[in-house]
Amino acid sequence: MAFFSRKSKGPFIRVSEMTMHWDTEDPFIFVSHHEDDYPAGNRQMAPPLEEISGRNLGRDYKKIMGFRMFNGKVVPGFPMHAHWGYETVTLAQTGYVDHSDCEGTTGRYGFGDAQWVSAPGFYEHCEMYPLVNKEGRNPNDITQVMIALPPEKRNLLENSVNTVWKDEIPLISSEGCRIQLICGKYGGFEMKSPSLHSWADGSRWVRMMRIELDPGASVTIDKADPSANRNLYFVSGEKGKVLGEEVNWGTQMKISPDVEVDISNGEAPSVFWILEGVPIGCKMSMFGPVLLGSDKEVREALQTIRKEEFSRWPWEVIDRVNPAESGRFIQRKDGSRESPDVDT
């Protein structure tokens, strides 16, 4: 959540080098972005055995042969794990995510869909990356943004899970530029969290956008709320200019909210993300998967997770995936099912 970087002499407040885990500011607490080029899947929707042998399965974060298994031992991904006290927004730009949770919800989303999970109280789910394509490779590009919940909403038991399908996410296009509006207001469109207790409920300035630029293209992003924290992330490409300053990809820039942000791309296709938000501005204590108001609350929550994580899990396995032919869907604990009109 803290912003560790060097102070810039240019037009930026601060600059920092990016890794797979991006630094953030209140109300954001964490961002993880990864791209992996998975091989064709076998009958288990997993990589072939010869490509995963010798890895530290269960904690494989070193990219070997173009991909990582993360915490998965058969299918790549993240088996059963807890969230408590924050909201998680996951954009699966490429590839599929299969999810199941402790409340009986399950589903699959991907190829431009986004999932919003609000976990004010005890919540566990698994997020696996099924290699559905058995004939060719299964690349993925997944970005996960975590947003703190306001203190009065934490420690509730009303968790919620929602999928926003690709066609429901505004895509604002101009010459050489495509902007996906995940949350906030831009270009005459507005998106807000579909979750129950979100800070991004439309009454505060929370904006998340993914910006694709063709070679030589440019875009200007309007001013943000004057009290918002604002960070721009140069995710992929080569070189470009931001506010007239030349920057390389892999650079994170903290920018004042009261200026228009001019971005000019270089000679390679590029991707930027921008995260803006009015801070919650209250005391937060976080350890592992828990974000609450005090160290005592966090310790108590962690103890609850240790005692109850397996007894509350309703599925037979902790790394559950759906059948290969499932398509994109979400099925809730009451048995209701939603799916986009056209599958990818």
Image (cartoon, rainbow, N blue to C red):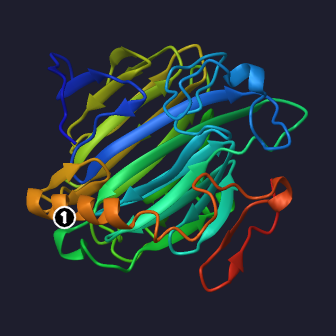
Q: Is residue 311 left or right of residue 147?
A: right
Front position in the image: 289 or 176: 289
- Please name the residue shown 62% across and 48% down the image: 128
Q: Position of residue 149 (x, y in %)?
A: 27, 65
- Residue 210 seen in this snapshot: yes
Residue 128 vs 67, above or below: the answer is below
Q: Secondary structure at mark 1?
A: helix
Instruction: Provide residue 1's location: percent of width, then percent of height.
Output: 22, 42
Is 76 situated above or below 137? Answer: below
Which residue has dot 1 on it? 300
Spot occupied by residue 207 in the image (x, y as percentages of width and height): 37, 54
* Number of marks in picture: 1
List x then y, in percent, for residue 267.
Answer: 58, 13
Which quadrant of the view contains residue 13? top left
Residue at 39% x, 24% y: name it.
Answer: 19
Residue placed most toward the observer, 13 or 64: 64
Q: Would you call the spot at circle 1 few (<14 residues within 10 Å), some (14-19), or many (20 or more)?
A: few
State the residue in front, 178 or 154: 154
116 displayed left or right of 216? left
